[in-house]
Image (cartoon, grey):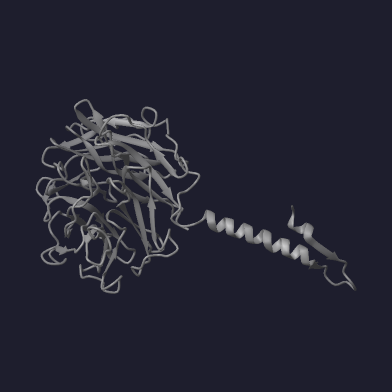
Amino acid sequence: MRLLAFLKHQSPINGSQPKFTFGGRALFCLLLCLGIAGSSKTAMAQAGSLAPTFGNNGIFTTNFTQVDASIAIAVALQSDGKIIAGGAVPSGVSQTVALVRLNTNGTLDTTFGSGGFVTNDFGVEFAEVYGIAVLSDGKIVAAAEGITGGSIGRFNSNGSVDTTFGINGFAVSNQVNGEGGPAAMAIQPDGDIIVTGNSVMARYTAEGALDPTFGTDGIAPLGGGFASGIVLQPDGKILITSGSSASHQVSTVPPQLPAASQGVIARYKTNGSLDQSFGISGQAASVTSVAGIALQSDGKIVVAGTINSQLIVGSNQTGFGLVRYNTNSGIDTSFGTRGGVITGFPPAAAGFALVIQTNGDIVVAGQTITGTGSFATSFALARYTSAGRLDPTFGTGGKVTTTLGSNTVSWISSLVLQTDGKIVAVGNTGANTGEFLDNFVVARYLTQ
């Protein structure tokens, strides 16, 4: 029904402009229609809701059928909006790297690899991807770790190996061994690649060779052990977080949250040496684990992870922890409560990933215990204003929980923001039946 049908037209008198008046019933109907349209628009745009046009009501899930089938750890976006997720899948008695690419609507992109999937052992045993980046030319760089070393692979946009990189497409080093703990990757503006491993980091040229100008023959020691996150400052300096309670450490058999412990932030110069002007001898402590790190546009540093606190209501008083630092490593006391934020998802939760929106809002994601009688977990997200307060316009009171089935173990490993601001979360889900059957999950959330 056209709204103009409710209008009553009055002819102009003495050259005056036409006038329109509303009858009582017409006015009521018009306001009713506008109210319905407005409320529908609000409901559709509820921040924190799953995007209904993506995948199956906002979620894409693989359908693996093997026990301990997969783990999804990393995510990246192409310039055309397609999503690449990476992790590992079983391969005989070992495991191998797996990459999957989705179209913008959350369906498998069958032009990528074989039916949307690429698997490769990366030249190391028990390999799994921990970092993915898409280059300006559309090629894909992925970093993996395994029990015999670390490896970087480069792929063409169709998923085939780019044999012009490294040796036949891969740069393998048994000195950069991330096995047993989390690792991280970053791409410099000049195309050089920085990766972390077991207490070391390395820099490779864009062609896949160790950079002799970095550290010693391309490898430098890490001050804080296993790295959980990395971010590059505009001046080229390198911020690396180290600590436990990363998504790599989720236990599925038996199921349990990773233990939370205090983390460390370290800053390194462009040559790989510790920047002594940062914190104490180049390092700053955090009261929370530091699974994620991000830079604000003003250069301030935000870290997020898991924290144990008596301020959290729950059986084990574990939840999301968030801390903001000034550029010199001093805690920014204007943020949250004297520099930090503690958020509970009773009975317990763990934070693994962090992104900052263009308006300064901060999104943290991980997992929360939701089962009764047996261990089950769900996706957990929280959004904070730039001042460090839970954003009441996001989900319920600033928090969102997404349950992917009854008696399932589910968690978010990584986050990335689309150009339109929507949140893409990559993680895992599987039935808790004693033997964990795991699947990749990619979910898209609305932000406004």
Front-lying residue, 287 or 182: 287
Q: Position of residue 265 (x, y in %)?
A: 18, 60
- Say if 15 sits above or below 2 in the image: below
Q: Is residue 307 left or right of residue 42?
A: left
Residue at left offset 39%, top offset 42%:
83
Residue at left offset 30%, top offset 46%:
376
Residue at left offset 84%, top offset 64%:
9
Q: Position of residue 202 (x, y in %)?
A: 16, 46
- Say if 167 sits above or below 306 in the image: above
The part of the image, by quadrant, that contains residue 16 is bottom right
Given the current orientation, which residue lies at the most extreme top position?
Answer: 92
Q: Is residue 355 left or right of residue 241?
A: right
Given the current orientation, which residue lies at the most extreme right position?
Answer: 14
Given the current orientation, which residue lies at the most extreme front position?
Answer: 373
Front-lying residue, 363 or 254: 254
Q: Position of residue 290 (x, y in %)?
A: 22, 57
- Say if 389 sits above or below 366 in the image: below
**Residue 24 makes an appearance in the image:** yes
Residue at left offset 32%, top offset 58%:
345
Q: Position of residue 410 (x, y in %)?
A: 32, 45
Q: Is residue 403 left or right of residue 45?
A: left
What is the number of callouts on the image?
A: 0
Front-lying residue, 179 or 311: 311
The part of the image, by quadrant, that contains residue 144 is top left
**Residue 137 makes an appearance in the image:** no
